Amino acid sequence: MNNTIIRLTARAMLGGRRLYLLLGLALLFLALATLLRLFAEFGTSDATEFIQAVSLGALLPLFGLIVGTGAIAPEIDDGSVVYLLAKPVSRHTIVRSKLVVAVITTVTFAAVPTFLASVIMVGGSSGIALGFGAGALVAGAVYSAVFLLLAIATRQAVIFGLVYALLWESVVGGFVPGAQVLSVQQWALSVTESIASPGAVSANVSLGAALVLIVAVFAAATWYAGERLRVLTLAGEE
Amino acid sequence: MMTTLTLKDVSRWFGNVVAVNDVTMSIGPGITGLLGPNGAGKSTVINMLGGFLPPSTGSVELDGAAVWKNPDVYRAIGLVPEREAVYDFLTGWEFVLLNAELHGLPDPGEATRRALATVEMEYAQQRKVGDYSKGMKQRVKMASALVHDPAVLLLDEPFNGMDPRQRLHLMELLRRMGADGRTVLFSSHILEEVEQLASQIEVIVAGRHAASGDYREIRRLMTDRPHQYTISSSDDRALAAALIADGCTASVSLDSKEQVLRLEASQFLNFAELLPRVSRDAGIRLYQVTPADESLESVFSYLVQA
C-alpha cells in the first residue's frame, strides 16, 4: 500500500459533495431508526427485518457503489489518473491503496450507522446489533472491492452497479433461492446470524459458505482490479 | 544519460480503423518534434511510447526494455499529457509533491521546490491548481514531469492554447532540457513550432511515417512539391500561353466556366518570381492569385506520396 495514494484518495473521496451525501444518508437512516423506536410498536423481528432491508438491502450496496466507483472513476474519466499510473508503483498497490480508503469510508458511513441503528432499535445485549454491524462491515468490504473493479473495467460502472444492486440483490436475491447463494446480502446476513442470539435472523447461506465466498470474492475482485489497471489504456482524443 | 526510444514495425488499430501504420523510428537525445495534422496518429504514438497503449503489432521500447506493462520505465520518463485534468483540489505545491512522493524520491520536498523553480511557478504554488490558467496548468504539469529529473520527456501538444509569451518560455525550457542531453519528444500540428525547436523532425500523416530529418530537409520537401494556383487576370488565355512558353509550370488549364486559370507550378520559389515577370512582360494584369492546396493536410499528403 502507498500512503501518498491513500491520502490523495481520501481527499478526493471526502473533499466534495460526496461527503455530504454519505453523511446525509447515514443520518437519515439513524433518524428513521430513532423515530420507529419512539413512535412505532415494533417487535424485535420487525426491527431486524427493517435493518436487514434498509441497511444490508439498500444502504450498503448503494454506499459500496458510490464509494467503490468514487475511489477511481472520476480520475479515469478526466484522465488525471495518468499521474498515478506513470509512476514506478505497482498497479496492484494503487488498487489496494484505493480499496483501503473505500472500505474505511463504507465502514464509517454505513457499517457504524448500521450498528448504531440496531442498538437504538433492539438494544445492545442480544448480539443483534453487533451481528448487523459485522454483517454490514463484510458487505461493505465486498461491495467496495467489486465496485472498484467495475469502475476500472468499464466506464459504465455506475449503471452496471445500479442494475446489480437493484435487480440482483433485491429482486432476484430476495426471491430466487438459487441466486441467494450469490448474494452479498445473504453472506452478510449469514455473518449476522452467527453472532446474533439464535433465531433472531435467518440467512439462506451457511456461515462456512458465506465466509469462503466473502474472502474469495474480495480477494479475487481486488486482484483482478489490479490486473485491469495494468492494461488500462488511455486512448488519445484525436 | 543516453536514452533512446524505439518503435519497430509498430501498427495500432482501433477496431477497423488503423491509427498508426507500420511505423519504425528511433528517438535519441536532443529535441525531436512529432509533426502531423490533427488525427494523424501523433497522440497514439505518444500514448504507446508512454506505456498507455499497447501496439497491435511491433515493439515499443525504451533502451531495449518494453514500455507496455512495465511501470519501472517511469523512473526514466516524464510525461506531459495533452489533457488538462489534474487533481484540481490540490495546490500547485501539493500536486508536484504528490508526483515526487509517488516516485519515491529521497527528498520529495527539495525535488518539488526545484521543479517548481524550473518552470517559475513558485509564486503560485500555494494556490489551487483548479484556479490556474491554462498556461499555468501546463507549467505545473511540466514541473510534475520533471520532478524526478527524467532522461526522457514526452509532451503531447504542449503548446496548445498557450499565449506567445508562455510559448516562448516553454520553448526556452525545452531547449535547456535538450541541451542537457535529455531525450525530448513533443508533438505538434504546427510546422513553425516544430521548426523553431526540434533538431530532428518526424512527420506522421494518416498513421504513416511520412518523413524524417532535420528541419531544412522537411522544409525542402514541403516547398519543392508542385504548387497549385487559381489565377484570374485580364487575359487568362494569353497568360496561359506565356507561362507554358516559359516552362516553369507542370500543367496549365483554362476553366472557362469559372473564368479562371488553374495551374501547377513545379517549383514554389521560382514560380513566385516568374508569375509577376511573365504577366508584366505580356502586359497582362493579375486580378487574383490563390494557392489552391496550401492547407497543412495537402502539404502532408504530398509528403506521403513522395
Image (cartoon, rainbow, N blue to C red):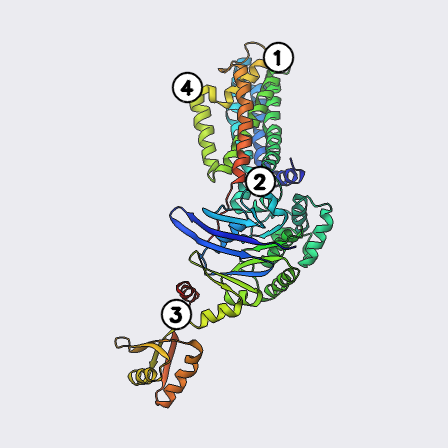
- Quarter holding residue A195: top right
First-in-chain label (1 vs 2): 2
Q: CA distance from mark 1 to mark 3?
A: 85 Å
Subunit bearing disc 4: A
Across and down, in percent, residue A5 comes to 63, 40
- Residue B99 makes an appearance in the image: yes
Q: CA distance from mark 1 to mark 4?
A: 30 Å
Q: Secondary structure at mark 1?
A: loop
In what quadrant of the picture does the N terminus of chain A appear? top right
For disc 2, the marked residue is: A17
For disc 3, the marked residue is: B293
Eye-nearest disc, 4 or 2 = 4
Q: Amino acid at mark 4?
A: Val
For disc 1, the marked residue is: A126
The residue at the far left in this view is B257
Query: Which one is in front, B226 or B44?
Result: B226
Eye-nearest disc, 1 or 3 = 3
Above/below status of B34 relative to A26: below
Q: What is the crowding at mark 2: few (fewer than 14 residues within 10 Å), some, or many (at least 20)?
A: few
- Quarter holding residue B242: bottom left
For disc 4, the marked residue is: A176
Same chain shared by disc 3 and disc 4:
no
Subunit bearing disc 1: A
